[in-house]
Image (tube, rainbow, N blue to C red):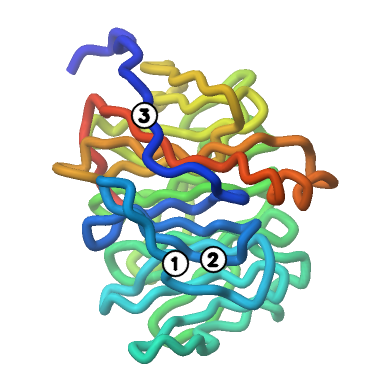
Amino acid sequence: MSSKPSPTPEVQALLTGLAMGESPRWHEDRVWFSDWGAQEIVAVDLDGKSEVIVRVPFGLPFCIDWLPDGRLLIVSGREGLLLRRERDGSLVIHADLRGLSDKGWNEIVVDGRGNAYINGGPGIIALVGSDGLARQVADGIAFPNGMAVTPDNSTLIIAESHGKRLTAFDIAADGSLSNRRVWADLGGGVPDGICIDADNAVWYGDVPNKRCVRVREGGEVLQTINLDRGCFACMLGGVGKRTLFLIATEWRGMENIPEVARVRTGQVLTVEAPAPGVGWP
């Protein structure tokens, strides 16, 4: 594969008027995401037709992924709970994270074995297995954000927003993490949500720099998509998983989140990707 930077393809708007989107996931031929500002989980198809799947009683952050059996998991970040949506639409507690930290929780990724990794708190990663028990498997993360697992279930990559790097761990058979290492030093990049493609490159959303960037292991920048607002997260999906979905919103600081949510500057954008998505989420 060539390592030359790709020309910037056209960015198109799939959905607009969101309060504050996050945590995009490609599932059952639609891109799903959390609209933090509206307390909704929304799914939109490739024609731009959207549907509110779940209205949640809690505020941001709440991120999503699925168990292998198709049931939806929702991180209720402030409450320190991992919730599971049952077949009848009810929400039940899947795991209680409060014993590990009361500092709040953020992102989730479920790997191919059904292990759920959740990060947040004081810079930690927790693992929730099929037994529903939570245990800490990493710490010292400089503001943990997006996570992704390689298609062979061997490596977890996490965005350290304040560390301006992507960090990798080896995944053991029991889900434990080891061999922590810098996967990519991003220089001035501030990574948020991430996803992996078939060329073993990672896309990361960058809020303060208003862009989405594709990098190789080691930090070589392959492609940059510049936007007019912060890019909170990205996900590969669509036909052949060759569409990159970008979640973008104006960012005016934590203290102004309610104001931004009311203005509804959030968007789901699409762009053709040079390589298809692989791994999880």
Q: Is residue 158 above or below residue 64?
A: above
Q: Is residue 40 above or below residue 37?
A: below
Q: Give the labeled residue for mark 2.
A: 40
The image shows residue 156 at horizontal and vertical percentages of 42, 50
Q: Amino acid at mark 2?
A: Glu
Q: Give the labeled residue for mark 3.
A: 12
Mark 2 vs 1: CB contact within 8 A: yes
Q: Quadrant of the N terminus?
A: top left
Q: Nearer the viewer, residue 8 or 220?
A: 8
Q: CA distance from mark 3 to mark 1?
A: 22 Å
Residue at the spot 26% in from the left edge and 36% down from the top edge = 243
Circle 2: element type? strand
Q: CA distance from mark 3 to mark 2?
A: 23 Å
First reached walking from the N terminus: tag 3 or tag 2: 3
Mark 2 crowd level (few <14, some 14–19, many ≥20, 10 Å Cα): many
Residue at the spot 32% in from the left edge and 29% down from the top edge = 271
- In the displayed image of the protein, which residue is found farthest to the left? 240
Q: Amino acid at mark 3?
A: Gln
First reached walking from the N terminus: tag 2 or tag 1: 2
Q: Is residue 5 visible?
A: yes
Q: Quadrant of the C terminus?
A: bottom left
Q: Give the labeled residue for mark 1.
A: 52
Circle 1: element type? strand
Residue at the spot 14% in from the left edge and 42% down from the top edge = 240
Residue at the spot 41% in from the left edge and 49% down from the top edge = 148
The image shows residue 272 at horizontal and vertical percentages of 26, 28
